Image: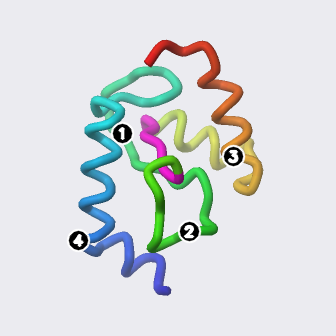
Amino acid sequence: MDYQKYLQSDEWRNKCIAVRDFWDNRCAVCNSDINTHVHHRTYHNIGHEQANDMILLCELCHTTFHKIVNPLSMFDQIAVMLKGIPR
């Protein structure tokens, strides 16, 4: 699958809408509503993502995760950070 082409698809746009609705268009880490991005928790299911394969992050948190966290362990890191945050 061509990842960049997939990110331009209606299927991806619809999944993004669902993720944004679930998180009330706020970052799952810092609760910011400024410049949010739908982020893959795992890249193993590209094109067949389940709801828990994606998370909403603001630009700062999204950039930080890509700089400091190994993508394969990202789900574990996010789970630790989200523990205790009321939802």
Circle 1 crowding by C-alpha within 10 Å: few under 14, some 14–19, many from 20: many
Q: Within the magenta stretch, is there residue 25? A: no
Q: Residue at x 39, y 46 (%)?
A: 37
Instruction: Say whether disc 2 or disc 1 marks the residue closer to the N-terminus.
Output: 1
Instruction: Say whether disc 3 or disc 4 marks the residue closer to the N-terminus.
Output: 4
Q: Which residues are magenta?
A: 53-58
Counting labels gives 4
Residue at label 4?
Answer: 10
Q: Is residue 68 above or below residue 11?
A: above
Distance from Cα at disc 2 to Cα at disc 3: 14 Å
Q: Amino acid at mark 3?
A: Met
Distance from Cα at disc 3 to Cα at disc 4: 26 Å
Instruction: Say whether disc 4 or disc 1 marks the residue closer to the N-terminus.
Output: 4
Which image quarter: residue 20?
top left
Residue at label 3?
Answer: 74
Instruction: Say whether disc 4 or disc 2 marks the residue closer to the N-terminus.
Output: 4
Q: Residue at x 69, y 46 (%)?
A: 74
Distance from Cα at disc 4 to Cα at disc 1: 19 Å
Q: Amino acid at mark 1?
A: Thr
Q: Residue at x 25, y 60 (%)?
A: 14
Q: Residue furthest bottom?
A: 1
Q: Are marks 4 and 2 in contact (CB under 8 Å)?
A: no
Q: Given this view, does label 4 or label 1 mark the residue nearer the observer? A: 4
Circle 2 crowding by C-alpha within 10 Å: few under 14, some 14–19, many from 20: few
Q: Secondary structure at mark 4?
A: helix
Q: Secondary structure at mark 2?
A: loop
